[in-house]
Each structure stands twice: as structure tokens, then as C-alpha cells.
Image: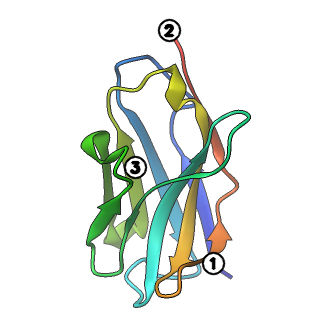
Amino acid sequence: QVQLQESGPGLVKPSQTLSLTCTVSGGSITTSYYGWSWIRQPPGKGLEWMGVIADDANTYYSPSLKSRTSISRDTPKNQFSLQLSSVTPEDTAVYYCVRNNIVPIRYDYWGQGTQVTVSS
């Protein structure tokens, strides 16, 4: 029932900010006991959790990315967004927005993913 759809530019220049939006249907991003995460997968590598915005709008980030990562939400549009600043080619990846249960952590609905390439 819950569907997530990523959107945003597929190509970003180095040093710029990567911005993606996730549109959620079939459920509210304010529903209790769910978080809304961004996860990425660089080519040839595993999944990397980036951060989450919880049902109360609190945010939590991977320590390795928190200095340049921001997750926000727009509740009237039922959307949440990702901003990753100062990107390099190492940020090239497929980016997913994902719903997760909170305690225990369980990822139950995923967007289809969107390819973002960082290149000049």
C-alpha cells in the first residue's frame, strides 16, 4: 500500500549539493512508529544508511555523513528530502528512500531508487 518515489537530478557536479525528494503515498510521514530513511548503494558496494527523519521530525545521521547531510520533511506534501553538500564522484550511487519501523528497525517499503552521478 505504501509507495515511495524518489525524484531529483540524475547528474550533479562536484562540489555542488545533491538534492532529492521522496514522495510518499498510501501512508503519512507523520504516522507514529515509522522513520523515513535515505539509503544509497555506490557501484559495486553495499548499501549505506545515510540518515532518517523520525515520526516526530527528529533526525539522525550516519556519523560519516552528518557534517554534510540534511534530511527534512514537508508534511502537507507528504514528502521528505535529502540534501548532501560538497559532493564528489565517491557520492555516485543509487539513492533510495525507505520506510522503516522503529524498534525493531525493519525496512519494509522501498522506493525504486534513482541513479545519481557526480561528474564534471
Residue most extreme to the bottom: 32
The residues tagged by marks 2 and 3 sit, at their Cα atoms, a distance apart of 21 Å
Name the element at disc 3. strand
Of the two numbered discs 3 and 1 on the same chain, state the one appearing first in sequence. Answer: 1
Give the camera-side residue of 53 and 25.
53
Name the element at disc 1. loop
* On screen, residue 114 above or below 50: above
Rendered-image quadrant of the N terminus:
bottom right
Q: Mark 2 points at which residue?
A: 120
Give the camera-side residue of 90 and 97.
90
Give the camera-side residue of 22 and 48.
48
- Could you tell me residue 9's position as x and y percent? 52, 32
Circles 2 and 3, Cβ within 8 Å, touching? The answer is: no
Q: Name the residue under label 1.
A: 2
Circles 1 and 2, Cβ within 8 Å, touching? The answer is: no
The residues tagged by marks 3 and 1 sit, at their Cα atoms, a distance apart of 19 Å
Tell me the crowding category of disc 2: few under 14, some 14 to 19, or many 20 or more residues within 10 angstroms, Cα based: few
Q: Name the residue under label 3.
A: 82
- Could you tell me residue 111's position as x and y percent? 65, 60
Residue most extreme to the top: 120
Query: Is 110 left or right of 89, judged from the image as shown?
Result: right
Of the two numbered discs 2 and 3 on the same chain, state the one appearing first in sequence. Answer: 3
Can you tell which of label 1 and label 2 is closer to the viewer?
A: 2
- Could you tell me residue 90's position as x and y percent? 52, 26
Of the two numbered discs 1 and 2 on the same chain, state the one appearing first in sequence. Answer: 1
Amino acid of disc 1: Val
Tell me the crowding category of disc 1: few under 14, some 14 to 19, or many 20 or more residues within 10 angstroms, Cα based: few
- Which of the 4 image quarters holds residue 35? bottom left
- Could you tell me residue 11's position as x and y percent? 54, 24
Amino acid of disc 3: Leu
